[in-house]
Amino acid sequence: VQLQASGGGLVQPGGSLRLSCAASVTLDYYYIAWFRQAPGKEREGVSCISGTGLTTYYADSVKGRFTISVDNAKKTVYLQMNSLKPEDTAAYYCAMIVVRVDGTNWYEGDEYDYWGQGTLVTVSS
């Protein structure tokens, strides 16, 4: 399984970016998540979606600003990030897990089976 993250860049506060995570397999039986890690900080779960798109989870810090979605035809998960803040600056990684997750464990990065490379998001004026 391969995951390819893209879409990062430099954006001003209040701006938007859309990250993409393209997979080499169909997503129906997986959960796919976005994590981020800022310099000097621990990795943080940002959002997670079931391969069917029926279940989503968000970190409190991004609720109402970020939206995760899946396009199974393209085998791609998206993270639409709006109203970006300087504290959103980080390397963003997508990851995939085979087993079902729920609200108590979707953010446990060590449980995930496959990881993509990071894409850097910088929010700065």
Image (cartoon, rainbow, N blue to C red):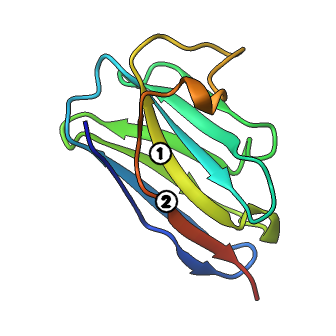
- Is 28 situated above or below 84? above
* Residue name at image x 42 percent, y 56 percent: 117
Q: Secondary structure at mark 2?
A: loop
* Residue name at image x 74 percent, y 41 percent: 63
Q: Quadrant of residue 108?
A: top right
* Residue name at image x 70 percent, y 51 percent: 65
**Which residue type carries mark 1?**
Cys
Q: Which residue is mark 2?
A: 118
Q: Quadrant of residue 69?
A: top left
**Residue 36: which disc?**
none
> If the image is split into quadrants, where does the C terminus sit?
bottom right
- Is 37 situated above or below 51? below
Q: Nearer the viewer, residue 10 or 43?
A: 43
Image coords of residue 100 (percent x, y): 48, 10
Q: Quadrant of residue 32?
A: top left
Q: Nearer the viewer, residue 107 or 73?
A: 107
Rounded to the nearest angstrom, the CA distance separating label 1 from label 2 is 8 Å
Image coords of residue 121 (percent x, y): 60, 69
Q: Which residue is mark 1?
A: 94
**Which residue type carries mark 2?**
Gly
* Residue name at image x 20 percent, y 44 percent: 74
Q: Are marks 1 and 2 in contact (CB under 8 Å)?
A: no
Q: Residues within 10 Å of mark 2 (few under 14, many from 20)?
A: some
- Is 71 situated above or below 12? above
